[in-house]
Amino acid sequence: MDDTSKVVLVTGSSRGIGAAIALLFAKHGASLSLTGRNAEKLSEVAKKCKENGAKQVLETIADVTKEEELDRLVEQTIKTFGKLDVLVNNAGILILGNLDAYTSESFDALMSTNVKAPMYLMKIAKSHLAATKGNIVNLSSIGAFYNNSTALVYSMTKLCMNYITKSCVKDLSKDGIRINAICPGPISTEIFDNSFTNEEKQGILEKYASSLKGRVPTVEEAADLVFFLASDKASMVTGECMPFDGGVFVSSTT
């Protein structure tokens, strides 16, 4: 199946990595189901996608923590396009904090957005992906591989995402569905900028400046990896959780 016939659903597509993923699929002629909470920003991304080759773009304002809104998202996608080939679970939030900073509110917010939402979306999209022998790409984090006390619950949610990705392989493979995850390190996005102080950001950038690649990855490079995993060229790749940090993690463990 060539890329121009694909229908791709991208959550959290109004900004950052999600917007870059949507734009890349658009440039290859895919039809897109985009969702986010900011109508103005989502419309801006949809406009760019249309200008860059998307066959058709559906915009759905949705809160991924509400199952009824995810039901509506999938229903509208199928009603509009008649099928679904690729699900990209990109929506996520970052709340930093160690054990002392733990609150039930932040725990529930992180779990609802980063774990429950993608898992539920996978469940309700499964039959549609089975019909197209499609695939799922989950956005995890390099934080899933570290013992990181300053991002305790966030890193735990990304470890959960990796566990879900690997544990669902057998069941999904029975229906011809592939599933993979990418695990980015810090990328210069709105979430990154809003989550760290200038001093913390400078420290992270300096760490990456002295890394194997000498810089942080870009959102476009993250989109390239997602696009590859969703393409037929990756037909033998499933159940993988791929670090995407320019070698920072592997160089710190060798």
Image (cartoon, grey):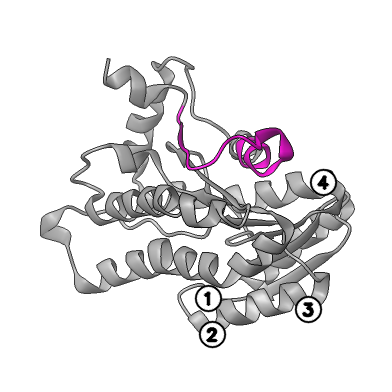
**Disc on res. 1:** 4
Residue 242 in magenta stretch: yes
Q: Residues within 10 Å of mark 3 (few under 14, many from 20)?
A: few
Give the number of the mark in front: 3 or 1. 3
Q: CA distance from mark 2 to mark 4?
A: 31 Å
Give the number of the mark in front: 2 or 3. 3
Task: Please tell me which residue lies in front, 161 or 192.
Answer: 161
Who comes first in sequence, dot 3 or dot 1? 1
Q: Which residue is mark 2?
A: 68
The residue at the point 66 percent across, 61 percent down is 129
Who comes first in sequence, dot 2 or dot 4? 4
Q: CA distance from mark 1 to mark 2?
A: 9 Å
Q: Which residue is mark 3?
A: 79
* Residue 117 in sight: yes
Residue 107, image x and y in percent?
26, 67
Element type where label 1 sits in the image? loop
Element type where label 3 sits in the image? helix
Q: CA distance from mark 2 to mark 3?
A: 16 Å
Q: Which residue is mark 1?
A: 63
The residue at the point 49 percent across, 17 percent down is 213
